[in-house]
Amino acid sequence: MKKILIALALFAGVQLADAQVKSPADAMKAVEAAKAAAENPKKAEKVATWLKLASTYVDAYNAPAGSLWVGASQQELKLLMGNEKPVSVVNAELNGEPCTKEIYSNKELYFNGNGQLVLINVTKPVYPDALACAKDAYVKANEVDIKATKTKDIAAGLETISKKYYEDGMNAYMLGNLKEATVGFEKAADAAATAPLSKIDSTSLYNAGYTAWAAQDYNRALTFFNKCLEVGYYYEGGEVFAKLADVYAKLDQKENSKKTLEQGFTKYPESQSILIGLINYYLENNEDPDKLFELIDHAKKNEPNNASLYYVEGNIYKQLGKTDEAIKAYYSCSGINPDYEFGFIGAGILYYELALEYQDKAQNEFDDKKYMALVAEFEKALESAYEPFEKAFNISKDDSIRINIAEYLKNICYRFREKDPKYEAGFEKYSNIVKEGKIQ
């Protein structure tokens, strides 16, 4: 759910924009006054009446959190909160990380190890459905705004509501309440789609599907992932296809799962999630995996100069346990694009993982002869990984990739440092790179 976690930072300053936040009591009084005005037949004909009602509901939503904001330090909050003290302070966990939770009469504040506020969880809202009421008021404002003089104001209000629902979804996700999270994201998408804003919030649609999938509510996840496809949102690397296919599989709709994976593969042949899903489908259902190579060949015809397609082909062979074919495909990448390092990386990792398999087998082998044979295979595979890794290291222009490759090369050179001077020199070179975390 990387995108959700990254998106959390976008809302760090949301509450800063809510100037002059009312106290819960004042917010409630303001809502009641605005409601009374909206019930007056003459005032109900004015768009300003409904805009006022909507804004008072938003104020009521904001009231329990007051002027607090995510990212503030505990010292800053002490100045803002004055005499408001927590009922209790306990150790807690938030999204797998230890934190401190301050419990108040109407909210909970979560602080990370650096004493920064990372989440505000309102436990006693002024109105449980304040955002829904605000949205309804904006809808009504749009209805009475016959001359469309306040379209921008209404759209801006709906945008605010959408963001606050999204923040609710984020908070619920961080707290581990997946069912609440998916509802929050759905409401965010719904508010964004409401006229006159009328915007497709593809991120909220995906997050609603993802959290429903994580909560194992597969029918609900099916709805949102299909909506993502309808609006042309596939998430990073076509992840929507992979998740939707998994949902179909969980619902025992195998043919739909297969079609979804194949559709995703034609658009994103480099997606490991889709590729592994397809391979598993063919193997589990005793279908011919050669269909994958047909798809790859079709992609090659469309993009004959795309070296990554040969890398994907190597991954398919690797998953099918066909080592020689995988190595051949990986090395074919350089024939298409000499600067494409991932083919060599794929070959290096294959040999390296093969070496680890032999090592594990050797550790569990008690027959000396068989043990020595496995050690010989281990060293052969490990040394075979050196050349492709070194080639990848030399042609890559990405220092972060080169540092990762250096970790493999360091380990290989350490094993053979007494066998050949090049490995001894290589061990010193790559060890320094890994230690320094940069290319010298």
Image: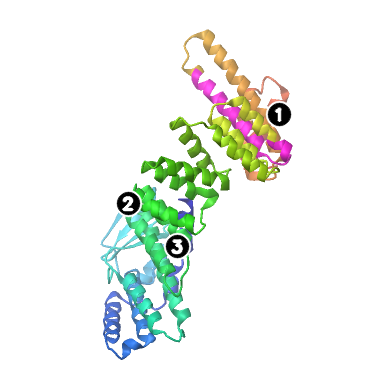
**Colour approach in the figure:** rainbow
Q: Position of residue 380 (x, y in %)?
A: 63, 20
Q: Secondary structure at mark 2?
A: strand
Q: Residue 248: within the magenta?
A: no
Residue depicted at x 71% and y 43%: 305
Q: Position of residue 108 (x, y in %)?
A: 31, 61
> Residue 55 is drawn in which quadrant?
bottom left
Q: Secondary structure at mark 3?
A: loop
Residue 28 vertical placement versus 348 (above, below)? below
Q: Which residue is mark 3?
A: 71
Q: Secondary structure at mark 1?
A: helix
293 or 104, which lies in front?
Answer: 293
Q: Which residue is mark 2?
A: 91
**Mark 2 or 3 closer to N-term?**
3
Residue depicted at x 62% and y 41%: 298
Which amino acid is tagged 2?
Answer: Asn
**Mark 3 or 1 closer to N-term?**
3
Q: Which residue is mark 1?
A: 425
